[in-house]
Image (tube, rainbow, N blue to C red):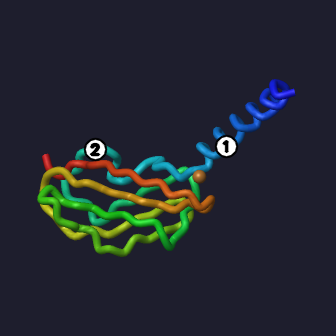
Amino acid sequence: MRGSTLVGIIPLLLWLATGEAAAHAFLDHAEPRVGNKVATAPREVTLWFTQKLETAFSTITVTNPAGQRVDTGKTRVSGNQMSISLRSGGAGTYRVNWRVLSVDTHTTDGNFSFQVGR
Ligand SMILES: [Cu+2]
């Protein structure tokens, strides 16, 4: 009795687990591209996700090589995409921190860097 119940439950749990993982909003790609080098400091950063985002709780912050915030603080969200304008912050390594709430109510976050200059 106990054994046959488990046999029935395990495939259901696996199905739920894989369905959940596929449903979260993960970073698909970004502009400037993750880890890429660009000649001049970009005017904005745009991130594309694997799922639609909730506007209210999805944010991006960007710091320049000196660790200072160079984003304007106003993240724009549209569908599965969000972007933020930047002030000029010199050459070197920029770090992008993102946090999103997807439409399935799950929160994910992450960060990446890109280089400015030659
Ligand atoms: Cu999810």
Q: Which mark is residue 78?
A: none
Q: Could you tell me residue 101's position as x and y percent?
A: 52, 62
Mark 1 secondary-structure assignment: helix
Image-quadrant location for residue 3: top right
Residue that appears at 54% across and 59% down: 80
Residue that appears at 76% across and 37% down: 12
User: In the current view of this chain or complex, which residue is farthest to the top?
Assistant: 3
Q: Quadrant of the N terminus?
A: top right
Is ligand 1 within 8 Å of the beta carbon of the residue shown at mark 2? no
Q: Which mark is residue 36?
A: 2
Q: Could you tell me residue 44's position as x and y percent?
A: 32, 64
Q: Is residue 60 left or right of residue 87?
A: right
107 to 6, vertically: above or below: below
2 to 82, vertically: above or below: above
Tell which circle, 2 or 1, labels the residue nearer the N-terminal end. Answer: 1
- The residue closer to the viewer here, 6 or 46, is 6
Cα distance between the residues tagged 2 and 1: 32 Å
Amino acid type, label 2: Asn
Residue that appears at 75% across and 32% down: 11
Image label count: 2
Q: Could you tell me residue 5's position as x and y percent?
A: 83, 31
51 to 20, vertically: above or below: below
Q: Which mark is residue 19?
A: 1
- The residue closer to the viewer here, 90 or 60, is 60
Amino acid type, label 1: Gly
Badge 2: residue crowd in 10 Å (few <14, some 14–19, many ≥20): few
Residue that appears at 22% across and 67% down: 70
- The residue closer to the viewer here, 51 or 118, is 51
Mark 2 secondary-structure assignment: loop
Image-quadrant location for residue 60: bottom left
